[in-house]
Amino acid sequence: MTDVGRISSGNEAIRSEAIGRAAGRADRDARPGETSGIERGQDSVDVSDTARVAASRYASEDNAIRQDLVDRIRAEIESGSYETPIKIAGTVDGLLDALS
């Protein structure tokens, strides 16, 4: 019997390097100290003058962090008691109301 190869439709792209999720695998699988040949750039953020003015106005208002509340919720999350069926049901109800 004769082997028949795949017939190309002409839409296939020939790639010489990994793309998407496969591109990151080489970095993740590399041993410490080794590089995979993929250079990663540095992130940066540009903030507009309008955003700076809005942030300074917000900071000047009385928006103090309620550290007691932050500490209480953080402790509840760590202990596993923060997410309760009642809170989840309330959240779902609120989302459904917002969507309808």
Image (tube, helix red, strand yellow):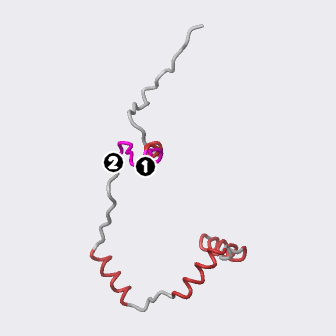
In the image, the segment drawn in magenta is 27-39
Q: Which residue is mark 2?
A: 39
Instruction: Give the image location of residue 54, x and y in percent.
Output: 34, 81
* Residue at the (68%, 76%) spot, across then down: 81
Relative to 79, is 57 on the left or the right? Answer: left
* Residue at the (70%, 73%) spot, across then down: 89
Name the kind of residue labelled 2 in the image: Glu
* Residue at the (27%, 76%) spot, across then down: 49
Q: Image height check: is 89 above or below 31? A: below
Q: Which mark is residue 32?
A: 1
Q: Which mark is residue 75?
A: none
Q: CA distance from mark 2 to mark 1?
A: 15 Å
Of badges 2 and 1, the one in the foreground is: 1
Name the kind of residue labelled 1 in the image: Pro
Furthest toward the top, the residue is: 1
Furthest toward the left, the residue is: 49
Q: Main secondary structure of the magenta part?
A: loop
SS for tag 1?
loop
Image quarter where the C terminus lies is: bottom right
Say few, some or many: other residues with alpha carbon within 10 Å of mark 1 (under 14 / 14 to 19 / 20 or more).
few
Image quarter where the N terminus lies is: top right
